[in-house]
C-alpha cells in the first residue's frame, strides 16, 4: 500500500512534464498541468510517509523481478528514507509553483518545456534513489538524476556560462557513477547479492570494507560537494535558473549525504579512523566553503559555496556518529546523526528560501553582482523580509531552525571532551572551534549578502528600478520561512522521525538508549527560544511605535560631507577585504588594475576576483597540461604502416623480455 | 532560589551603567582628572530617552529594530551567565552554545543596522565588527572548552563556579591562567575597549563599535548605549568564571564576593585603558589570534 | 609550590608569545628582562632551604638579566638611533603561529621524553623547549642585529629552564659561567653595533652578510 503510493507518485512526477510537450510552445496550460501533477505526487508521497509513520510497524518494502539481466525491482521505505524523502517532495512542489512565476512558458518558449520535463524526471529519480533497495536500480536512478540535472543546469543553452557549468557537472556526475559502480561491485563481493543497505557480515577492518567506504565517500562526496570534490558546484548553482539552484542545493546535495549515511550504516563496528576522517573532512569542507562564500561578489555563487559549508557541518555530525558507533558511545550517535539529519532538513528549508529570494532579485534587477545592487529593500519589502529570515536561519542564529541542528552537533562534539579517560578522542572536540569560526564567517558572508544587496542606497540603475515579485514567487518563500520558524521553536515536531532514523542507522544498541528529548533539554530550550522570539517581537513593536511621534526624517549623516553619493558606500568587496586578505593563501585572488601612486593620480581602475582554487587553479590547468602532453604524443600516430609494425615488434620484444624475467 | 533570581535580574538590569561609570572614574583618577560623576551613564541614558529621533531617508525597519534586538540578545545572554557562585536564572545542558549564538544574533542586527544607513563609515565599522568576531569566537569557544574539559559539564552553571565541588589544589591553574588572559583580551575586543577600540574617540576612521551607531539618535542611541553596557557586564561576569573561585558558604557572601570581583574587573579595565594606547587596526587580529592561541594552549595542557 | 611554579612557567609562555608578536623594540627588551627576572626567582622557590649561595646567585642573575643587560640594550638602541619598530622578515602573525605550533609540538614531545628523576612540574620541559624555539624564531626571522641579541638571550633563558630539571646535579656556578659568557657577548655585540652604526649607517643583518669579503 505504502510502496504502491510511492511508485505511483514517482511515475506521476516523472511524467509531469510530458503533457506540456504535446502542447504548443505558446500555451501555458502545460505548465499548470505539470505543477498539478507534481503537487499531486508530493501529496501522495506525504500520504505514504504519514501512513507509514502513524500506522506501520515494520518498514515497507516491495520486490518484483524484472527482465534485466541483473538485480530486481526492489524498493523500500525506512525512517532514514523518510527524512530525505520529505524535503524532495516539499521543494519539488514549492519550486514548481515558484517556477510558474520565475520561468513562465510565455517568456521562455524555447526551453520552458525542457525545464519542466527534466524537473519531473529529477524529482522522480531522487525519490527512486531514496527508496531503491537494489544496486542496479539505484545506479539507474542515479544516472537519470545526473542527466536531468545536466539539462536543468544548462536550461539556457545559449548561455556559455550555463553550458560550461553543465559540462563540468556532467563529468563530475560520471566520475561519481564510476566510483559508485566500483563500490557496488565490491559490495556484491562482500554480500553476494545486489540487495542494498544490509549490515555487512565481514569484519570491518578488512581491505574490502575500507575499499567500499572510500569509494562510497568519493562517489557520494562528488554529489554532495565535499571540499576538494566540490568543483562543479559553484558554477552550476550560480548559472542554473534560481529555482533549479534551490532544488539542486537544498535537496540534490542531500542525495550525496544520503549515500554517505547509508554506506556508513553497514558495519556494526566501523574503524574509528573512518569517523575521524569524516569529521576532519567536514571541518575542512565547512571552513573552506564559507571562506570562498564570503569572498564571492556574485550572490548566487555565494549561496552555492554556503551550501558547501552546510554540507560540511552535516558531515561533521555523521563523522561523530561513526566514531560513536566505533567506540560504543550512544550519546555521540544520537547527537551527531540527529544533528546531521536535522541540519539536512533545515538546509532544505532555508537554502531554497534564499535561492528563491535571489531569483526574485535577479528577476527584478537583471544582475548577479552584489556590487551593482543596494537599497532594494524599499522596492522589494516582502522579498527583503523573507531573505532576512533565511539569512539569520542559515547563520544558525536563534530562535530559528539552523541553531537547533548546530546546537546538537556542538553538544555532541563537546561530549567528546567530557568522556571518561582512556579513549584519547578529546581532539575531536577541536572541531567545535572550527565550527564556531565557520559560523562567524557565515555571519560575515550573510551580513554582506543581505546588507549590500537590500540595504543602503542603490548602486546602479538596475537596483533603483527593481520591482517586487508576484504572489506565486512570494508564497513558496512564506511557506519555507514559516518552516524555519516552526522548526526553530518546536524541534519536538520532528524528533520522533529523527529517532526512528537513528534507530534504523544503528539498530543494535538503540534499545537501552534514551530518546533525544529525554537526553537533551530540548523542551526547556524551546521555551527559552519562544521567550526570546516573543521578546524580540515585542521590542521591535515598541521601537516601531516611535516613528509617528517624534522622528525627523533626514539624509544619512555624511560626517560633515554635504554631497554623499551612493558610490561612496562601503562595497561588498571592501566589506570582506580584511577577511579575504587574511585567507589569501586559500582564496588565491586574481587582482588586476593599476596601483594609485602620487598625489594627483590619473583615473585608474582595479578589480579582484576569486576563482575557485581547486577548479580554476588546479584541475583545469592540470587537464590542459594533460591535453598538451597528449598533443605532443600525436606524432607517434603517423600514417606509415612500417611505423606501426615497428611498434608491434617493440611490444613483442618487451613482452618476451618480461616473460623471460 | 527566588531571591537569587531576583537579585540576578535586578543586577543585570541596573548595574551595567554603573560599571561604565566606575571605569571612567578609574581612568580619570589615574590621569589626575576629576572625572564625571559615578552615575553619569544613567544621566546620559535619561537624557537620550527624552530626546527626539532623526532617521535617515535611506533606512528601513532594520535600522530601528537593530538596537532593540541587540539589547534583547545581551539581556538573554545575561540571564544565561551565572553571576559568581549563584546559579543563573536560565540554565540547561548546552546553554554555552545558546550564549554564543544569541550574542551573534545581536551582532547580525547591529551590523545590518549599520549597513542600512548606506554610510561608508558605518559600513567600515560593520566590516570590522564581523571580521574581528571571527577571531574572538574561536577564542571564546576554546576558552569554554577548558572549562568543559575540567568540569565535565556542559552548562555554565555547573562549570567552575559550582561551589564546594572542586578543591583549590585540584584546579588546573596553568590552563585557567592561559584561558583567563585570552578571555580578558576577548572581553576588551568584544566590548570595544582600548587597546582594540577607543570608546571615547571621535575619529570615525579608526573606530569599530561607535562608528556603527553614528546615525542612531535619541531613545535608539539610549538602547544602543545601554545594550553595550549590559554586554560589558555579561562578558565581565563570564570572565570571572576563569578566575579561581573563593568558596563562600552563604548566598549573601557569594553576592558580596561577586560584586567585589566585578569591581576588580572594572578597575582592571580602567587601568589597562589608562596605561595602553589603542593598537593600530592592523595589529588587532594579531592580538585576537594570540587570545585564541592562549585559550588553545590552555585546552591542550588539559589534554596531557 | 608546584602551583606557583606552574603559574610562573605559564607567564614565561605568555611572554614568549608576546615577544613573537611585539612590534616595538622597547617592549621586546622589557619582555626579555621580565622573563629573565621571573626565571631567576625560580631556583629560590625550588631550593629546599635558602642558603646564601643561592641567594647570591639569584640576585646576580636578576641584576644582570633584569637591569644591566636591558640597560645596555636600551643604550645601544638610543646610540644607534635605530627605528623603534621591530622589522620582521616574515610577518608577526605567521611567526606567532609558528611559535604556537612549536609550543604545541613541545607539549606533545615532552609527554614522550623520558625524564630522569621527578621534575618539579610537568610544564618544565615543554616551556623550556618552547622558549628555546622562541629564541630561534627571533634569531631567524627578525632583521635587526639587536633583535638577534635578544634572541640569544631568550635561547639562554630556555636552556636555563631546562637546567632546573638538573638542579641537584649542576652547581649554580656553571649557570653563572654561561651567564657571564652571554653578558660579555652582549657587551661586545653592543659595542660592535655602535661601531657598525657609525661606519655603515645600517643595522640590517641582511646587508651585513655582504661584508664577508
Image: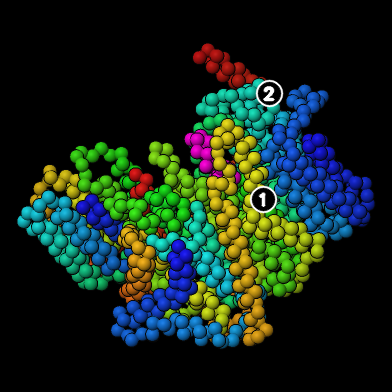
Whether the magenta-drawn stretch holds residue A327 is answered as yes
Q: Earlier in the sequence, mark 1 or mark 2?
A: 2
Q: Is residue A626 magenta?
A: no
Q: Residue at x 36, y 67 (%)?
A: B252
Quadrant housing residue A258:
top right
Dot 1: element: helix
State left or right for residue A327 relative to residue A406.
Answer: left
**Percent coordinates x, y for residue C64 in the rendering:** 14, 62
Q: From the viewer's side, name the closer residue of B152 and A391.
A: B152
Label 2, on which residue? A193
Q: Which mark is residue A493?
A: 1
Image point (58%, 64%), residue name: A532
Nearer to me, A392 or A221: A392
Q: Position of residue A406 (x, y in %)?
A: 56, 52
User: Disc 2 on helix, strand or loop?
Assistant: loop
Query: Residue C57: x percent and y percent?
Result: 10, 56
Over which residues does the magenta segment extend? A316-339
Q: Is residue C135 visible?
A: no
Q: Nearer the viewer, residue A182 or A59?
A: A59
Whole-angstrom CA distance, mark 1 to mark 2, is 38 Å
Q: Main secondary structure of the magenta part?
A: helix
Image mark 1: chain: A
Q: Residues within 10 Å of mark 2 (few under 14, many from 20)?
A: some
Instruction: Output the chain of dot 2.
Output: A
Given residues A339 and B56, the one toward you in this image is: A339
Residue at point 35%, 52% (across, down): B165
Amino acid at each position: 500500500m505504502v510502496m504502491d503510493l510511492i511508485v505511483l507518485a514517482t511515475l506521476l512526477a516523472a511524467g509531469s512534464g510530458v503533457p506540456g510537450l504535446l502542447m504548443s510552445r505558446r500555451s501555458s496550460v502545460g505548465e499548470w498541468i505539470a505543477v498539478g501533477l507534481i503537487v499531486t505526487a508530493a501529496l501522495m508521497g506525504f500520504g505514504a510517509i504519514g501512513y507509514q509513520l502513524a500506522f506501520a510497524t515494520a518498514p515497507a518494502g516491495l520486490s518484483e523481478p524484472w527482465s534485466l539481466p541483473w538485480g530486481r525491482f526492489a524498493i523500500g521505505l525506512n525512517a532514514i528514507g523518510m527524512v530525505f524523502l520529505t524535503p524532495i517532495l516539499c521543494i519539488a512542489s514549492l519550486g514548481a509553483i515558484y517556477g510558474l512565476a520565475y520561468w513562465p512558458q510565455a517568456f521562455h518558449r524555447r526551453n520552458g518545456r525542457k525545464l519542466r520535463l527534466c524537473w519531473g524526471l529529477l524529482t522522480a529519480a531522487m525519490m527512486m534513489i531514496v527508496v531503491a533497495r537494489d544496486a542496479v536500480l539505484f545506479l539507474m536512478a542515479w544516472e537519470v538524476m545526473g542527466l536531468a540535472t545536466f539539462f536543468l543546469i544548462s536550461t539556457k543553452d545559449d548561455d556559455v556560462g550555463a553550458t560550461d557549468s553543465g559540462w563540468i557537472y556532467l563529468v563530475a556526475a560520471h566520475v561519481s557513477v564510476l566510483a559508485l559502480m566500483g563500490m557496488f561491485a565490491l559490495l556484491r563481493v562482500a554480500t553476494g547479492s545486489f540487495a542494498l543497505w544490509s549490515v555487512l557480515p565481514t569484519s570491518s577492518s578488512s581491505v574490502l570494507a575500507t575499499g567500499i567506504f572510500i569509494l562510497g565517500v568519493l562517489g557520494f562526496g562528488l554529489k554532495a560537494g565535499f571540499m576538494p570534490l566540490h568543483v562543479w558546484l559553484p558554477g552550476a548553482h550560480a548559472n542554473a535558473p534560481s529555482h533549479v539552484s534551490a532544488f539542486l542545493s537544498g535537496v540534490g546535495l542531500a542525495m550525496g549525504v544520503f549515500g554517505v549515511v547509508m554506506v556508513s550504516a553497514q558495519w556494526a563496528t566501523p574503524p574509528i579512523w573512518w569517523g575521524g576522517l569524516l569529521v576532519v573532512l567536514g571541518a575542512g569542507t565547512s571552513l573552506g566553503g564559507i571562506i570562498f562564500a564570503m569572498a564571492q561578489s556574485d550572490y548566487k555563487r555565494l549561496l552555492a559555496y554556503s551550501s558547501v559549508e552546510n554540507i560540511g557541518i552535516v558531515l561533521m555530525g555523521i563523522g561523530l556518529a561513526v566514531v560513536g558507533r566505533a567506540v560504543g558511545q550512544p550519546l555521540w550517535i544520537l547527537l551527531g546523526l540527529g544533528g546531521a539529519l536535522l541540519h539536512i532538513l533545515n538546509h532544505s528549508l532555508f537554502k531554497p528560501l534564499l535561492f528563491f529570494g535571489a531569483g526574485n532579485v535577479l528577476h527584478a534587477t537583471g544582475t548577479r553582482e552584489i556590487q551593482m545592487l543596494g537599497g532594494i529593500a524599499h522596492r522589494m519589502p516582502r522579498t527583503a523580509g523573507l531573505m532576512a529570515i533565511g539569512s539569520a536561519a542559515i547563520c544558525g542564529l536563534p530562535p530559528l531552525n539552523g541553531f537547533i541542528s548546530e546546537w546538537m552537533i556542538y553538544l555532541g562534539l563537546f561530549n567528546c571532551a567530557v568522556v571518561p579517560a582512556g579513549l584519547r578522542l578529546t581532539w575531536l572536540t577541536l572541531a567545535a572551534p572550527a565550527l564556531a569560526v565557520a559560523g562567524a564567517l557565515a555571519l560575515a558572508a550573510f551580513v554582506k549578502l543581505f546588507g549590500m544587496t537590500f540595504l543602503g542606497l542603490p548602486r546602479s540603475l538596475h537596483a533603483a528600478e527593481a520591482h517586487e515579485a508576484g504572489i506565486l514567487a512570494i508564497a513558496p518563500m512564506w511557506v519555507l520561512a514559516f518552516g524555519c520558524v516552526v522548526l526553530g521553536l518546536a524541534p519536538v515536531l520532528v524528533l520522533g522521525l529523527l529517532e526512528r532514523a537513528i534507530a534504523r542507522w544503528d539498530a543494535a544498541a538503540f534499545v537501552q538508549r534514551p530518546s533525544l528529548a529525554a537526553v537533551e533539554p530540548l523542551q526547556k530550550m524551546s521555551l527559552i527560544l519562544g521567550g526570546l522570539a516573543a521578546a524580540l517581537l515585542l521590542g521591535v513593536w515598541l521601537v516601531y511605535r516611535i516613528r509617528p511621534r517624534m522622528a525627523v526624517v533626514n539624509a544619512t549623516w555624511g560626517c560633515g560631507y554635504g554631497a554623499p553619493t551612493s558610490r561612496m558606500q562601503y562595497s561588498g568587496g571592501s566589506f570582506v577585504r580584511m577577511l579575504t586578505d587574511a585567507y589569501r593563501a586559500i582564496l588565491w585572488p586574481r587582482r588586476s588594475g593599476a596601483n594609485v601612486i602620487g598625489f594627483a593620480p590619473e583615473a585608474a581602475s582595479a578589480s579582484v576576483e576569486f576563482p575557485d582554487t581547486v577548479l580554476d587553479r588546479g584541475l583545469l590547468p592540470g587537464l590542459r597540461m594533460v591535453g598538451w602532453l597528449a598533443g605532443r604524443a600525436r606524432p607517434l600516430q603517423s600514417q606509415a604502416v612500417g611505423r606501426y609494425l615497428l611498434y608491434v615488434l617493440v611490444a613483442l620484444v618487451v613482452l618476451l623480455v618480461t616473460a623471460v624475467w | 532560589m527566588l531571591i537569587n533570581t531576583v537579585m540576578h535580574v535586578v543586577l543585570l538590569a541596573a548595574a551595567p551603567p554603573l560599571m561604565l561609570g566606575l571605569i571612567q572614574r578609574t581612568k580619570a583618577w589615574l590621569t589626575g582628572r576629576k572625572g564625571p560623576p559615578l552615575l553619569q551613564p544613567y544621566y546620559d541614558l535619561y537624557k537620550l530617552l527624552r530626546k527626539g529621533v532623526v532617521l535617515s531617508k535611506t533606512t528601513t525597519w532594520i535600522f530601528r529594530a537593530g538596537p532593540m534586538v541587540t539589547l534583547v540578545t545581551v539581556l538573554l545572554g545575561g540571564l544565561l551567565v551565572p553571576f559568581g557562585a549563584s546559579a543563573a536564572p536560565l540554565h540547561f545542558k548546552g546553554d554555552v552554545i545558546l550564549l554564543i549564538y544569541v550574542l551573534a544574533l545581536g551582532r547580525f542586527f547591529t551590523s545590518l543596522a549599520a549597513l542600512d544607513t548606506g554610510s561608508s563609515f558605518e559600513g567600515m565599522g560593520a566590516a570590522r565588527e564581523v571580521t574581528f568576531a571571527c577571531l574572538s569566537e574561536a577564542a571564546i569557544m576554546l576558552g569554554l572548552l577548558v572549562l568543559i574539559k575540567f568540569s565535565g559539564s556542559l552548562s555554565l552553571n555547573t562549570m567552575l563556579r559550582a561551589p564546594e565541588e572542586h578543591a583549590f589544589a585540584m584546579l588546573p591553574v596553568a590552563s585557567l591562567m592561559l584561558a583567563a588572559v585570552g578571555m580578558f583580551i576577548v572581553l576588551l575586543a568584544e566590548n570595544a575597549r582600548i587597546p582594540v577600540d577607543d570608546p571615547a574617540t571621535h575619529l570615525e576612521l579608526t573606530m569599530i563599535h561607535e562608528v556603527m551607531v553614528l546615525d542612531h539618535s535619541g531613545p535608539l542611541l539610549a538602547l544602543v548605549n545601554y545594550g553595550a553596557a549590559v554586554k560589558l557586564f555579561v562578558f565581565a561576569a563570564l570572565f570571572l568564571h576563569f578566575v579561581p573561585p573563593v568558596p563562600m558558604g552563604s548566598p549573601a557572601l557569594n553576592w558580596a564576593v561577586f560584586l567585589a570581583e566585578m569591581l576588580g574587573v572594572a578597575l582592571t579595565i580602567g587601568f589597562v585603558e589608562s596605561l595602553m594606547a589603542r593598537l593600530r587596526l592592523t595589529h588587532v587580529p594579531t592580538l585576537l589570534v594570540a587570545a585564541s592561541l592562549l585559550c588553545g594552549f590552555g585546552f591542550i595542557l588539559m589534554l596531557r | 609550590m608546584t602551583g606557583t611554579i606552574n603559574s610562573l612557567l605559564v607567564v614565561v609562555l605568555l611572554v614568549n608569545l608576546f615577544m613573537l608578536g611585539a612590534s616595538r623594540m622597547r617592549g621586546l627588551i622589557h619582555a626579555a628582562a621580565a622573563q629573565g627576572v621571573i626565571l631567576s626567582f625560580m631556583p629560590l622557590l625550588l631550593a629546599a632551604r635558602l642558603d646564601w649561595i643561592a641567594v647570591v646567585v639569584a640576585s646576580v642573575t636578576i641584576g644582570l638579566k633584569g637591569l644591566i643587560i636591558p640597560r645596555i640594550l636600551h643604550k645601544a638602541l638610543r646610540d644607534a638611533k635605530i627605528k623603534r619598530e621591530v622589522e620582521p622578515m616574515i610577518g608577526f602573525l605567521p611567526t606567532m603561529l609558528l611559535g604556537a605550533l612549536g609550543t604545541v609540538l613541545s607539549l606533545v614531545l615532552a609527554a614522550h621524553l623520558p625524564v630522569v628523576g621527578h621534575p618539579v612540574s610537568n610544564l618544565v620541559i615543554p616551556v623550556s623547549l618552547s622558549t628555546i624555539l622562541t629564541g630561534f624564531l627571533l634569531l631567524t626571522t627578525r632583521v635587526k642585529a639587536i633583535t638577534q641579541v635578544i634572541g640569544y638571550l631568550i635561547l639562554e633563558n630556555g636552556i636555563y629552564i631546562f637546567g632546573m630539571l638538573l638542579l641537584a646535579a649542576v652547581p649554580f656556578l656553571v649557570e653563572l659561567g654561561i651567564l657571564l659568557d652571554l653578558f660579555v657577548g652582549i657587551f661586545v655585540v653592543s659595542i660592535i653595533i655602535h661601531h657598525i652604526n657609525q661606519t655603515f649607517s645600517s643595522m640590517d643583518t641582511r646587508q651585513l652578510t655582504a661584508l664577508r669579503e
